Image (tube, grey):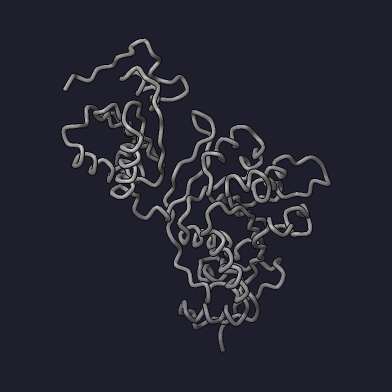
Amino acid sequence: MDELTIQSKGFNLFSEFSTYFDGPRLFFAYFGKIPSIKVIDRIDEKRLGKWLESEWKGKILARHSRQVYNRKENNLKFTDSFFILDNELIIHQDAERLIILYHSCPEETVIALLMRIRRHASRVGNRREIFLVINGQNGIETTPLKLKKPSLNMAIHYNDDLVSVHDKVIRTMKKRGYSGLYLFHGIPGTGKSTYIRHLVCSIDKKVIFMPPGIAGQLDSAMIAKLLIDNENTVFVIEDAEELLHSRVAGKNSALSMLLNLTDGLLGEALGIQIIVTFNTNPASLDKALLRKGRLIALYEFKPLAVEKTNILLKKMLMTECSAHGPMTLADIFHARDEGFQFNSSRNAIGFLANAV
């Protein structure tokens, strides 16, 4: 086997926009050719490394990696790994996907390798993570965050009318190539975010959280690339009152993009589903958001009914307390917090009293 060396020494291997090099630059540097690329997501870097060391022993010509110290976990975490294999193959694993770069290798061989990698190195527990949209060194990027599945019982923690809505949400989100909009609203503390966490852990799709500030740039070219790279993905936008505001008051090009994504040409092409939460009155929303065919679910999270509140209090072993009216989940779960006081300004919210 010939010694592997950098062939194109004059090529700008390191990008001026990044602290490391990318796959195509590395491929060109080693082999002097422009590669073809295949991509697959949900691959675990550690499992991939172990599998490659076992299956390709003696065929890994070089390995390059970048690691970043994770203070919270007190260890080094891989952000990029490059495996240079024989037959002019490079496998690049980053934080969220695997990329195979090749030139002379037969197409069927690359596809077979892709399937074997997917079978042996799929990310375990991938459904329990969410990707956050950030402004990275190369523009708009996503980074994965671990997501703990909440201990949630739909029959106990939410009002009865959520059950049929949840069934519809789950059924439609499992479809591929299916676009649509899900609008959730309600006063703070009623469990919107907890429900979404439960939902994310219940579907086998990539989920991306988009902060409201970035969602306001939906019509930008940078966001367009992000959307194209993430077809059949669920996007979550919380506290998006400004994005949903009626266009009657003025131009709202980000809203127009949202409408196109959920029931337009882009929606049909990309199959993107979008969950949006807000706290204002639905009457202020642009009417196009509520159109049949686009809107899959509209649900208001309300304080828990008094009967359910008392059942939950009993389940939490708070037998010394009872409720005389509806309460939010936040009020219920923090009722024992030192210095806790109920917000009397909330409408239709009950209060605790010593049981008699």
Residue at image position (49%, 79%) is 318
Q: Is residue 160 above or below residue 114?
A: below
Q: Position of residue 230 (x, y in %)?
A: 52, 43
Given residues 308 and 321, the one toward you in this image is: 308
What is the residue that sits farthest to the bottom in this orientation? 356
Residue at image position (20%, 37%) is 56
Please indicate whether residue 253 sits to the left or right of residue 132 in the image: right
Given residues 274 and 349, the one toward you in this image is: 274
Where on the picture, by quarter, is residue 227?
top right
Give the total of numbered labels: 0
Where on the picture, by quarter, is residue 159?
bottom right
Q: Position of residue 143 (x, y in %)?
A: 46, 41
Given residues 144 and 44, the one toward you in this image is: 44
Q: Is residue 230 above or below residue 343?
A: above
Q: Is residue 259 above or below residue 172?
A: above
Please indicate whether residue 255 sits to the left or right of residue 6 in the image: right
- Picture quarter with the N terminus: top left
What is the residue that sits farthest to the top in this orientation? 10
Residue at image position (32%, 32%) is 106
Residue at image position (63%, 47%) is 267
Please indicate whether residue 342 sits to the left or right of residue 104 in the image: right
- Picture quarter with the C terminus: bottom right
Q: Position of residue 309 (x, y in %)?
A: 57, 78
Where on the picture, by quarter, is residue 220?
top right
Q: Position of residue 248 (x, y in %)?
A: 83, 47
Q: Is residue 195 above or below residue 241?
A: below
